[in-house]
Amino acid sequence: MEEKYKKIWEEAEETFLEVLRLSLQKQKEFRKIGDVAGEELLEKEVISKYESLYLALQSENFDTFSEEQWNMMENTLEEIRKKHQISREYLWEKRNLRKHLAGKSGAEVVKKLLEYQKKELEKQKRQILEEANHLLEEEDILHRKLCEAIQEEEQLRLF
C-alpha cells in the first residue's frame, strides 16, 4: 500500500476508534441517568455500525482500491470527523500515543505473565506425570512380586 493511502487507512482506523470511544462514553452517561432508549439507540445506530466499519477496515484488501475509492474514503472520513467534532490533529496525537504505548500496556504485560505462568504449570505437569509414571511402574513391579509370592505360598500349602 502506498504511503499516501496508508495514511488514509490509519486515519480511518483512528477515526472509527475515536467515534467508538466517544459513543461508549455517551452510552455510559445514558446508563447512568437511566435512559435505556437512548442507550439502545446509540448501540444500534452508532456503535454497531462503527464496529462493523472498523472490522471491515481490518479485513479489507485495500491494494485493489482505485484513486477514486481512496478519495471517496477520505471525503467520508472528513464528514465523520465534522459530524463528531473530531480534529485531524487530535486523531494524529492519539495515533502517535497508541504507537508509542504499543507493547507497554498493562494488558500486554499481564498476557506475557500469564503465558509464562502457563509454561511453568505445563512444566510442573510434565514433571508430575513423569513421577506418576515412575510410581506406576514401581507399583506394577511390586504387584507382580506380590502375586508371585502369593502363588508360591499357595503352592507350598498344597505340598
Image (cartoon, helix red, strand yellow):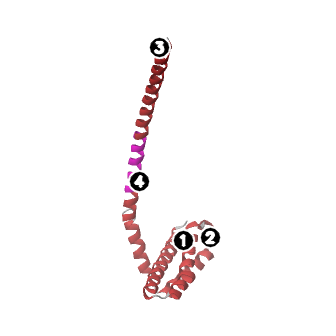
Q: What type is the residue that disc 1 sits on?
A: Tyr
Q: Do the residues labelled 2 and 1 touch (CB within 8 Å)?
A: yes
In the figure, 106 relative to 17: above or below? Answer: above
* Secondary structure category for the residue under label 2: loop
Mark 3, other Cα within 10 Å: few <14 / some 14–19 / many ≥20: few
- Foreground tag (2 vs 4): 4
Q: Position of residue 33 (x, y in %)?
A: 43, 88
**CA distance for labels 3 and 2:** 93 Å
User: Which residue is labeled 4 in the image?
Assistant: 115
* Secondary structure category for the residue under label 1: helix
Q: Residue at x 47, y 17 (%)?
A: 152
Q: Quick one: label 4 or label 3, which is nearer the N terminus?
A: 4
User: Which residue is labeled 3 in the image?
Assistant: 156
Q: Is residue 32 magenta?
A: no
**CA distance for labels 4 and 3:** 61 Å
The label number, if any, that marks residue 65 in the structure image: 2
Q: Quick one: label 1 or label 3, which is nearer the N terminus?
A: 1
Q: Are marks 2 and 4 in contact (CB under 8 Å)?
A: no
Q: What type is the residue that disc 4 sits on?
A: Glu
In the figure, 64 relative to 35: above or below? Answer: above
Res 62 seen here:
yes
Mark 1, other Cα within 10 Å: few <14 / some 14–19 / many ≥20: some
Q: What type is the residue that disc 2 sits on?
A: Phe
- Foreground tag (1 vs 3): 3
Q: Point out the stretch of residues depicted in magenta.
A: 113-127
